[in-house]
Image: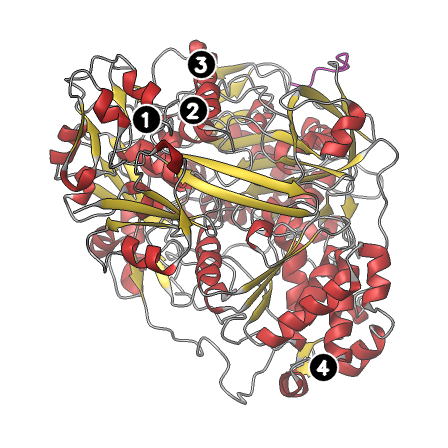
Amino acid sequence: MTTRRQFIRISMLGTGGLALVPSACKHFIPVDVAKAATGNLFQRTPTYCEICFWKCAGWVYKNDKSEIWKITGNQEDLNSNGRFCPRGTGGVGMYYDEDRLKTPLIRTEERGKQKFREATWDEAFDYIAEKMKGIAKEHGPECIALFTHGSGGTYFGDLLKAFGSTSIAAPSYAQCRGPREVGFIATFGEEIGSPENTDIRDTKCLVLIGSHIGENMHNGQVQEMSDAIDKGAVIITVDPRFSTAAGKSKYWLPIKPATDLALLLSWIHVIIYEDLYDKKYVEQYTYGFDALKEHVKTMTPEWAYGITTIDPNVIRKTAREMAYASPAVIVHPGRHVTWYGDDTQRTRAIAILNAILGSWGRRGGFFRSDSVAVPAFPHPPFPEPKRTWRDAFPDKYRLADLALASGICEATIPSATRDCNFQAWIVNGTNLIETLPNQKQTIEAIQNLQLLVAIDTMPMEITGWADVVLPECTYLERYDSIRTGPHRKPQIALRMPASEPLYNTKPAWWMAKELSKKLGLEDYFNWNSFEESLDWQLKQVGTSLEEMQRLGVKTFERTADDLYYAENEAVEFATNTGKIELFSTAFEAEGFDPLPKYTPHEDPPEGYYRLIYGRAPMHTFSRTSNNPNLTDLMDENTVWINPKVAIEWELKNDQYIWLKNQDGIESEFPIKVRITERIRWDSVYMVHGFGHADKRLRRCYGKGASDARLITKVHIDPIMGGTGMRGNFVTFLTEKPAEKEVQS
Amino acid sequence: MRYAMAVDTKKCVGCSDCVVACQTENNVPIGYCRDWVVEVTDGTYPQLEIEIRSERCNHCANAPCVRCCPTGASHFTDGGIVLVTPDKCIGCGACIASCPYDARYPHPDGYVDKCTFCIHRIKKGQQPACVAVCPTKCMYFGDLDDPNSDVSVVLKRRKHKTLIPEAGTKPELYFLI
């Protein structure tokens, strides 16, 4: 954070930098306080947030000029409890951003040159439909893939399935939470999902393995962590960086990066060999305890000390804290867990630890979520595709339960071992240039495509590479499908437009329906208006569009089992043995270690530091970097450097430097130095999502550095194809590096 | 009636939601703020502490900004809330110089602006926007003369401090430590 004077100074500098922007931000309405106080009859419309995946439900308020004014949480909503996070509160900035995409664009020169002409929607759809038909004829419809993050994926997903392809990938899987889902499915037979089923509110001990709750603003979890602090819960944070959560913790374990698995195994050792595990639970529900006990026999705290640098006494003490709190203990599964390539095994160890502590299905541990099954609007059955994304990887990543964005990217580049490459990408709301590691490979894949369509609200880097850009209106200007995410009670939430779309922008459902007409697939979008389809769906679950427009959120009674397991409840787990598998029979069958093993990872070479990246509470990935309200809170990232390292390199606070990684890749833009004791001497830290290279993003262009650009070495998880991204090392350049290539 | 606010530094994560909620609620122009976050790191790796504070006008009982205002634009209103009447303000900046908390800024429309404890919301029985939005529920607001108000209760229960007490301004913004 900064002092107020700095804050104002920085912010004013930001405004100065905006001299290019012709008009002042529209959402400043100079009304004095007295007037605002008397203003009433503000209109409000329900929405759920699209700034991140948490999808909090809230209300959009307009001022007395009928302009969008502010967004607040819906009290009924379990994801937000009526409190939006800074990004959701700043969501108005997404609507008012002058740099938004404003009309459909068709590329006029080679890819990457960013030369476009404005087009009509009809022209844009004709162009896309023509190409799609050609590719289907020549290669089959399966060679078209969809990358998606956010609401629009539903409609383009349906369109693609109707067309004959099921290659639909979200980078939130292989670049984020995939390993954790596979690790928990292998253990408990079910995934964690989103929002997580962690009962933080009632926990007595919360263990965070590199998870920086509070900096990642996963709203409900941040709220519940605060509740837990209020109730005196013990927090144990394992992180090479003194995170905000570490600052709230009774125990902070400043671990040597990449050694978490050794710590987890030694905790399991202590809990078993000190007889601290939940015997009744283990006996009733688990499979493979004896094998686990034998497996961790030598994995003592002393063994782990040599690997992790964590004091063995602290390892014992923290293990006992967990056991005392058991079963109201959560060893948090994390969310972005694609770190070192053995991530599924690390999350398996987390799952095993939770299992022997008896926390799964128990109050203060993990609850059983429930959700409402809203039927889809009737449409003909989708055709069976001849190939799926899996066929691009025979015998690899067999335990992946969702498509791999990175895999589809790789399978777009022609290879002698593959008989079919992906020929077209439809990219909805995800900036693949910043999202996928190894930018060079992403661009190489793009250059091999016959068609790249990008749907976005902002001119993100990916849109600069597209053949056709379809400008979506923001979530404040559209209806979307009903939110049905799981929680303690089943809930649904409605998003409806608070305003007509600005510019020539449209909702994704409209685009998909219009495109379906060009492809002869209109039967799959067989509704006259989107409102009609929503109303039909809502009536199937006993409500209506009219009621939801008034309520925003509706809560239902649980239909599934109770929130927690009852005493001695017989539980059938969806694993091969029907038990919680401490020893994974599924992994064994696929030739993977059935019990997690620690394997050492590479250390940074002399003069290099491990690149650790994370989140700031006021931004979501790279998608909010240009939002005027959120840029006002944070307009660039900094590189955190330990003071000892800074002295060695003669670096000063606030100095701008460039970073170079182990493969000689340099940051495109300089990044400001933050000298702080909060980072270990062998690592540096930066917030993800900055260093934008697209000049159309006028507020954030060139501000800070992109971690994605520096992540060129990727450790693939052999179990499910996750892309481990924390094995990259950087060094410092105090002079601007000579330009080698111009990418975009 | 004596309005006060307490901020729990043990719960605050420094997300700045209070800042953006205040900006949208009160139409504070981008580039300015009525509240802000301070994060103080102390110690040497790995013996470290951080204190995170959401700060704003302290609505001091002995407010130097009110005393030094030449036009009477800065004034006390119900419950000890310090306000600025924009029409009376000549933008001289004396109050900005006098405030030990740096809580005031020159609004581009030519007057000095600052936190009002969202008096327009309090009048409707609502909490200030920052308090209402905070995801960590780290802020408590209410009347210190009411022993049952949120702020009275939490100040009785928890150890707390004010900032720069030596300035003698009698601040009404408390930090739970």
Q: Is residue B16 left or right of residue A744?
A: left
Residue sitting at x 56%, y 46%: A244
Which chain does tag 1 point to? A
Dominant SS of magenta comes to: loop
Above or below: residue A388 compared with residue A581: above
In space, the residues marked 2 and 4 are separated at their CA atoms by 54 Å
In space, the residues marked 1 and 2 are separated at their CA atoms by 10 Å
- The residue labelled by disc 3 is A18
In space, the residues marked 2 and 3 are separated at their CA atoms by 15 Å
In space, the residues marked 3 and 1 are separated at their CA atoms by 21 Å
Which chain does tag 2 point to? A
Nearest to N terminus: mark 2 or mark 3? 3
Asked if labels 4 and 2 touch by Cβ distance under 8 angstroms, the answer is no
- The residue labelled by disc 4 is A287
- The residue labelled by disc 2 is A100
Residue A314, image x, y percentages: 73, 63
Residue A480, image x, y percentages: 36, 46
Q: Amino acid at mark 2?
A: Arg
Which chain does tag 4 point to? A
**Which sits in the foreground, A553 or B41?**
B41
Is residue A79 rendered magenta in the image?
A: no
Nearest to N terminus: mark 1 or mark 2? 2
Asked if labels 2 and 1 touch by Cβ distance under 8 angstroms, the answer is yes
Residue A728 in which image quadrant: top right
Q: Amino acid at mark 4?
A: Tyr
Work out whether residue A510 can be spotted.
no
Check disc 2 and report its element: helix, strand or loop. Answer: loop
- The residue labelled by disc 1 is A502
Residue A479, image x, y percentages: 33, 43
Work out whether residue A97 can be spotted.
yes
In space, the residues marked 1 and 4 are separated at their CA atoms by 58 Å
